[in-house]
Image (cartoon, rainbow, N blue to C red):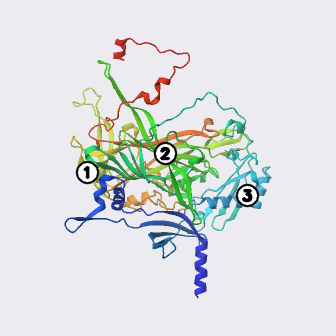
Amino acid sequence: MRRQYQTRLILVRDGMRFVEVVLSEPEKHVVAMADAYFFPPYQPMLFTLKGKSSLYPLRLPHRRARLVVYNKNTNMTSIWVVELSEVHAAARGGHHRGKIISSNIVPDVQPPMDAVEYAECEALVKEHPAAIEAMKRRGIYDMDLVMVDPWCVGYYSEKDSPSRRLARPLIFCRTESDCPLDNGYARPVEGIHVLVDMQKMEVVEVADNNLVPLPAPDPLRNYTAAATRGGVDRSDIKPLHISQPEGPSFRVNGYAVEWQKWNFRIGFTPKEGLVIHTVAYEDGSRGRRSIAHRLSFVEMVVPYGDPKDPHYRKNAFDAGEDGLGKNCHSLKRGCDCLGLIKYFDAHFTNFHGGVETIENCICMHEEDHGVLWKHQDWRTGSAESRRSRRLSVSFFCTVANYEYGFYWHFYQDGKIEAEVKLTGILSLGALNPGENRRHGTVIAPGLYAPVHQHFFVARLNMAVDSNPGAGLNQVVEVNVKVEKPGPSNPHNNAFYAEETLLRSEQEAQRDCNPFSARHWIVRNTRTFNRTGHLTGYKLVPGSNCLPLAGPDAKFLRRAAFLKHNLWVTQYYPDEIFPGGEFPNQNPRVGEGLPTWVKQDRKLEETDIVLWYVFGVTHIPRLEDWPVMPVEHIGFSLVPHGFFNCSPAIDIPPYDSTDENSHKETPMKGSQPEMVPGGLLSKL
C-alpha cells in the first residue's frame, strides 16, 4: 500500500508543470507597512504602541507565493498558495522551505501555453508524415525551411472543450534554410489544417483539402541591415548622443523609485509584465499623496476580420493564453532607450520548476519632452519657458510575429501617460493566382494581410488621496454640452461641462465619445482643494475603437469585456483579469468583468478599480511591410483639482550651457537674420 502511494506521488510530481509562480500580493495595509521602509512619510506605520508610551516595531508577515500548476499526466490544473518561511540554517542545510497554505483543483480550465510546449509542438508537426507530404505537394522537401507557430484553439464548439489541451498551428516556410535572418512569415502555408493535443503531444489531425500555391519569394521580405539583405542603408544620419554628466535625477532602492516628487515601486508578473505599485506624489507641506495602488496591462485581444479558415480563428488573448511577461525581451540584445538607463531583471519559474532570469528586462530612463510651458509678455518682451522631462518605465515583448512595447511615463506636471507601441511583422495569408480578398490588403504577389484589431485592457486600482484600502473614491463622467438657445445663451455660443456620478457598477459601463469630449474623474470624497472642490485625477482617452464584429461573434464569448471602453468596479482582490484567469479554451460565456458587474456593487464612496479598454483597427498598408513602423496608442491620467496650482511652476529655467550650445554651428547654406528690437519685443 505504501509503495502504491509512493508510486502515485512520483507520477503526480513528474507530471507537474509550473505555469506561473507569483507573489500573492498582501493586503493593502501590509503594502503600506512595506512602503514605510522606503518612503519616510510612512515611517510611523512601522511602530505601534506598547503600553502607554513605548513603541515597538511591527513585523511584516511572511511572504506567500501563488502557483498555477498543470499536471501533464492528468490534464488537471490546480492553484497552490505557499508561505515562504525561512528555516534555521542548521536544520535543513540552509535552505528556505515553505508551508502549503492551500491547494485546490480548478475544473474545466486550461492554463496558458508555455514556450516549452510550443517548441515541442513545432518539432512534432515537422516530423509528422502527413505534414511532410502536404509540404511536398507545395514543392517543399526540406523541412528545415518550415516554421510552425502554435496558436490556442479558442472556443468555437464543444470540440474545443478544455477536456483536451489543444493547439491549431499556423505554418510558414522560409526561402533559404541556411539563412536564419530570412523572414519566414513572408511565405504563409495556406490550406493545411493541423490539430495538436498538447497534453499527449500528438498530432490529432492533418487536413490538406485546399492546395494554395506558396507565394513566390518576395525580394522585399527581409528587414535586417543592408549587408544581410542585399540593400543599401542610409549614410547621412549623424550621431545623436544623450549625455547626463551628473547622472540621472531618479533614485532607486531595490525596486522603489523616487523621481521629481514621484515615488512608486516596480513589479513584474508572467501574465502582465510590468506592474507599477503604490504611486504617490510629494506635495510640499501636504506630504506624500497617494494616486494609485496598482497599475498594469492585464489583457490584450487581437481579433481578425477575415471569415475564411484559418483567419477567423485568429483571436489571440496574448496575456491570458501566453503571458506578456513571459514573452518579454532581454534588452542586452539591443536597447530601445537612450541616455543613462537603469535596468531591472525579471525572474520566472520555468515550466519544470527552475528559475530563469531575463536580464535587463525593464528599462527606466529620463527623456527630454520638449516645451513644458511658455509665455512671452508682448509689452515688455520678457519670456519664461521651461522644458519638460519625463521618466519612462517600459518593457517589450514578442508574441509570435508581433512586438509590443508597454510604457508608463511620469511627467513633472503630475500627469501619468500609459502608452503601447505596436510593431513587428504582419500575420499574412496566401492567395491563389488572380485572387483578391476584401478582408485584407495585398502586400505582394500571392500575399495578403487580413484586417484586424488590437485591444488592450489597463487595470487601474486608483487611490486618489486615500490611505491604503480606504474606500473614499468615486467616479464622475464629464460630457461637454451645447447650451440651448435662449435668454441664457443669446449669442448661441455657450457650452459647459456636465458631470454625472456613476453610482453603481451597472451604471459604469461606458464608451468613449469624442463629440462630447467625454472623460472620467476619480475623486476623493473627503479631500478638498483651495477652491473648495474635491481633489481628483481624470482619465483622458486617446484614440479608440470598439470591436467590429457582430454581437454573436464567437470570440466575444470569451471577450465580452471588449463591448465597452470603460468599466468601473469595486475593488476585490481576486478580480484581476477581465476575461477570468483562464481564457484559454474557456467555454463559459462572459466570464470575468461582465459577470462581476452583475453584482451591481455601489461606487459612490469606495475602493475604485477602472478597467480601460482601448484599441486600434489595423487596415494593413504596403508601408507596413516587411516590418511595421511603430503605431502609438494609449491614454493619460491627469490631475484635476488635485493640486492648488500647476505643480510644474517650480521647474528651474533651462540652462543652455548644459548642452554645450557654444559648440553648435549653423547649418550649411543658412545664416541667422537680425530682427529689429521693436519687432522682437512684439514677437
How packed mark 1 is, by other alpha carbons closer than 10 Å (few <14, some 14-19, many 20 or more), is many
- The residue to which callout 3 is attached is 126
Quarter of the picture holding the N terminus: bottom right
Q: Residues under labels 2 and 3: Cα distance? A: 36 Å
Q: Residue furthest bottom?
A: 1
Q: Nearer the viewer, mark 2 or mark 3?
A: 3
Q: Which residue is mark 2?
A: 615
Q: Percent position (x, y) of residue 15?
A: 60, 71
What amino acid does circle 1 point to?
Thr
Task: Point out the tag, 1 or 2, that comes first from the N-terminus.
Answer: 1
Which residue: 20% across, 65% down? 53
Alpha carbon distance from label 3 to label 1: 62 Å
Element on which disc 2 rests? strand
Residue 254 placement, left or right of 443: left
Label 3: element kind:
helix
Quadrant assignment, res 85: bottom left
Query: Tag 3: residue type?
Result: Lys
Query: Disc 1 versus disc 2: distance between alpha carbons?
Result: 32 Å
Of circles 1 and 2, the one toward us is 1
Question: x and y percent of residue 311 in the render?
Answer: 62, 50
Which of disc 3 and disc 2 is earlier in sequence?
3
Residue 140 percent coordinates (x, y): 78, 50
**Label 1: which secondary element:** strand
List the residue tagged with mark 1. Answer: 525
